[in-house]
Image (spheres, coloured by chain):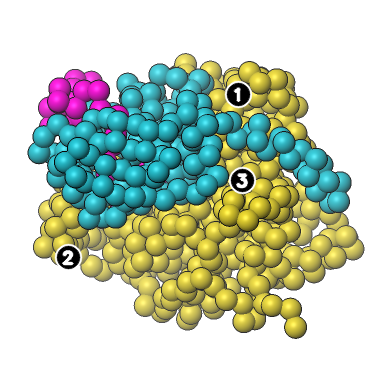
Chain colours: A cyan, B yellow
Amino acid sequence: MEPIRKHEGLVFPLNRANVDTDQIIPKQFLKRISRQGFGQFVFYNWRFDSKGELRNDFSLNQPKYENTSILVAGENFGCGSSREHAPWALQDYGFRVIIAPSYADIFYNNCTKNGILPVILTEDEVQTLINNAEAEQYHLTVDLETKKVYDSQGFEATFDLDDYKREMLLNGWDDIAVTLSHADKIDQFEAARD
Amino acid sequence: MRKPKTVIEKIWEKHIVHHEEGKPDLLYIDLHLVHEVTSPQAFEGLRMNNRKVRRPDRTFATMDHNVPTIHRNVIKDEVSKTQMETLKVNCEEFGVPLADIHHPDQGIVHVIGPELGLTQPGKTIVCGDSHTSTHGAFGALAFGIGTSEVEHVLATQTIWQAKPKTLNVKVDGKLGKGVTAKDLILAIIGKFGVKFGTGYVIEYTGEAVRSLSMEGRMTVCNMSIEAGARAGLISPDDTTVEFLRGRRHVPEGEAFDQLAEEWKALATDEGAVYDETVEINAEEIEPQVTWGTNPGMCIPVSETVPTVEDGTNENEKEEIKRALEYMGLKGGEPIDSVPIEHVFIGSCTNSRLADLRKASEIVKGHKVNPNVRAIVVPGSHSVKAQAEAEGIDVIFKEAGFEWREAGCSMCLAMNDDVVPEGERCASTSNRNFEGRQGTGARTHLVSPEMAAAAAIKGHFYDVRHLDVHATI
Ligand code: SF4
C-alpha cells in the first residue's frame, strides 16, 4: 500500500451524519472480484439518478470539487456493512484523507489498511472545515508525522491515531508481513491448545 | 480472591498470542466463516503473495449473499455467478470446507454456524460480515472484519485488535406478550442511538435477556452492530448448553458435559466491572416499527411518525426531514395507518425455525392482503427442511406467501429479490438504510410476528390485537 506522510489537497464537504457504507457504495457494485475500479461507483445513488445520469443536486458532481482528495463529513461516518469496497471506492475515486468527528469501527480499520488516513477532529473543528469548504475552494494539509491538520489561513488542529496504525500508514506496510514475524508465537499458541 | 471478570475479558485473555504495551493485541481466531462477497480479493491476495490458508480446519465457507431463492440453477446475474464460482475455486485450491449452493448445510453464514454447532461459547469468531456479532448469543467473541482482515486471518489465523471497552446493556423485567427479541433490540437502539456502542463490546444482561431462547438471543446480538458495537454477547448458561447438545460439531457424552461446565464458567463473575452500563426496562417495550432510514429511527406501533419539529437541533431536524422525504412520509401520521406493498420474512436476524414458527402462528387461518406481495426466505437449507416437516410452509403458502430457498435475499437485494423504487416493505431484516432493499425502496424493520400481521392487514398493525387462530 502507498505510504502516506503529508498530504495537501482540496476538501470536499459532506455535511451529513451517519453516512453508511450502503451510501458510499451500493451493493449492486460489490460483485467484482478484484480491488480496483470501484471509484466510479462511489456515492452512486447520490451522484446518479435512476437513469444513470449525473445529478446536479449532489455537490461532488460540481466541477469545483474535481480533484478533491480530502473528504470531511459528519459523525459516525462509514456505519453499517463491513464491506471494504467502501474504502476501495473512496480511495479509487481519489480520496486519501477523511476527516470526521467519529467513525464506525470496522470502516475505520478498513481505511488504515488501504492507505486512507481517517482523521478524528472535534465536531466544532469539523463544522468549521465544512463551512470553509462550502464557501469556496478550500485546501488543507494533513501531516501524519506531526498529527496536525492546517490551512494557509491560520486553522490548525491536532489529531490522534494509535502508534501501530500510524506506523503502518507512514510506511505503507502490509499487516500480514508484520504478523508473520511473530509466526513462532502463533505456533506456540497452537501447540499449547490443539 | 481472584478479581471478578466479564465474559469478554475472560475470552480475550485466553486468546492473546502477542502483547506489547501501547499496541493492539495479536488475537488468535478459533473460527473463520467465509462467504462469496467479501472473500474473493482476500484469496487473490494470498495467491499473489504465495501464501496458504493456515488453518483450513478452522475455516468454513458458504454462499448466501447473492444466491437465487426461486430456482437454484437460474442465476440471471453473470457477476453473481462469477462470485459464487470464484468461491468454489478458491475453496478447492486452498482446502477450505464449503457448503455451496446445492449443499444441505448451505444457508446464511450466521444461521448455519450455530446450527452446525461450529459456534460455541468462548470461541473467537470472525467473518467478513458485520452481523457476525450474531454468534455472540453463545457467549463467543464474534465480530465482523473487512476483506484485508479476512486475508490476514486466512494467512495467520490471528488478528490485531485493540482491547475493547465493555458495555453492559441491562434489561430488567419481562417482555410482554407479543413483544419479541426484535422489539427489544430495536427499542434499545431507538433509545440509545445508532452509535452508543461504538468502541465497545456489549454484554446483554438482566432478566429479560436470560429468559430469551437462543434464537431470540441471536436476534438481539445480531443487531449490536446497528448500535455501533462490533460485538455483542450474552454469558453462556443452560439455555446455551441445551441448544448445542447433539449438534454436529460438538462432542458427545461425557466430553460434552465437561465442555458444558467450562462454557458456563465463562459467564461474567458476580461483581465484575464494566466500562459503561445502560439500562432499559423490558416492561415498557411495545412492538416496534422503524419509520426512517437507520435502525435507531423506530417507534412503538401505537405512536405517530415524528415531525421535523421533533428534532432537538438543526442537524437532527435536517436528518428527520431527509428521512421522511426518502420514506415518503409526512410526519405526524400514526405508523399503523401506513400501507405496505411488500413483506419480507427472512435474514440473519429473523429467519430461524423459531421465527418462522411464530410468524406462521399469526398467519394461520388468515390471507395475505391483496395489495401485498409477501415472501418467506428460510435462513438455511436445514431450517427450510425442518419447517416443511412441520407443515409451516403449507400455512404460509395457503395464506398467499411465497416460500423460497435459503439465502440473504431481500435483506440486501443482491440477488433478484428487490423492492421496487418508492414501494414499502415490512421487513424482518436489520437495516433500513436508503436503497438497501433496492434503489428507492422503503424499508420498515419489524419482528416476524409484526411482519405477518402487516401482511394480513396491508398496513402496520399491533400484532397483539390480531385474532390468532393458531392452535400450534
Ligand atoms: S441476511 Fe442480510 S444482514 Fe445477514 S448476512 Fe445476509 S445480507 Fe448480511
In the image, the segment drawn in magenta is A52-81
The one nearer the camera, B156 or A41, is: B156
Q: Residues within 10 Å of mark 1 (few under 14, many from 20)?
A: some
Give the residue type that dot 3 points to.
Answer: Trp
Give the residue type that dot 1 points to.
Answer: Gly
> Dividing the picture into quarters, in which one does residue B337 lie?
bottom left
**Is residue B292 depicted above or below B182 in this figure?**
above
Are callouts 3 and 2 both on one chain?
yes
Q: Residues within 10 Å of mark 2 (few under 14, many from 20)?
A: few
Any magenta on residue A54?
Answer: yes
Give the residue type that dot 2 points to.
Answer: Thr
x and y, in percent, of residue A147 in the image: 39, 45
Are callouts 2 and 1 both on one chain?
yes
- What residue would you read off at disc 1? B45
> Dividing the picture into quarters, in which one does residue B238 lie?
bottom right
Please say if the residues under marks 1 and 3 sit with CB atoms less than 8 Å apart.
no
- What residue would you read off at disc 3? B160
- What residue would you read off at disc 2? B312
Please say if the residues under marks 2 and 1 sit with CB atoms less than 8 Å apart.
no
Answer with mark 2 or mark 1, whichever residue precedes in sequence: 1
